Amino acid sequence: MYFTYILQSLKDKTYYFGSTQNLEQRLKEHNAGRVRFTKGHLPYQIIYSETYHTRKEAVAREKFFKSIDGYRWLKENKIT
């Protein structure tokens, strides 16, 4: 299983969009400061995730979230 996820910084409310095969481990990596982009915005919490059968599907959904249509979808569904 693969996951697409959205994190929100508890420090400054910024968002991070990603995909992974191990959601729990990935959150630990983010909060340990091992991810360059999120390092300065610690700590993070997962605010949304979706599960997929393939990495390709998860990455495609991550890219969607980063698009203007994805931004609108997230706002309409009150996720961000």
Image: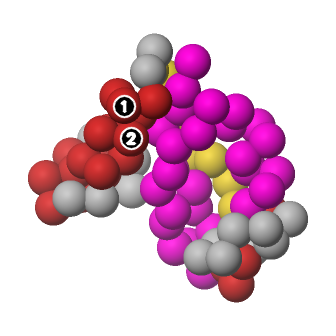
- Check the image and report above or below for 15 versus 6: below
- Whether residue 18 is in magenta: the answer is yes
Quarter of the view holding residue 58: top left
Which structural element holds mark 2?
Answer: helix
Q: Residue at x 47, y 56 (%)?
A: 17
Which structural element holds mark 1?
Answer: helix
Compute the Cα span from label 1 to label 2.
Answer: 5 Å
Answer yes or no: is residue 69 visible: yes
Q: Which mark is residue 41?
A: none
The N terminus lies in which quarter of the figure? top right
The amino acid pointed to by label 2 is: Val
Q: Residue at x 48, y 38 (%)?
A: 4
Q: Which mark is residue 56?
A: 1
Q: Residue placed farthest to the right in the image?
A: 32
Query: Residue 35, image x and y in percent?
Result: 69, 68
Q: Which mark is residue 59?
A: 2
Q: Which residues are magenta?
A: 1-30
Q: Residue at x 86, y 65 (%)?
A: 32
Residue in front for this viewpoint, 14 or 78: 14
Q: Is residue 70 left or right of residue 37?
A: left
Disc 1 to disc 2: CB gap under 8 Å: yes
The C terminus lies in which quarter of the figure? bottom left
Q: Is residue 40 left or right of residue 73?
A: right
Answer yes or no: is residue 75 visible: no
Q: Residue at x 76, y 37 (%)?
A: 24
The amino acid pointed to by label 1 is: Lys
- Whether residue 32 is in magenta: the answer is no
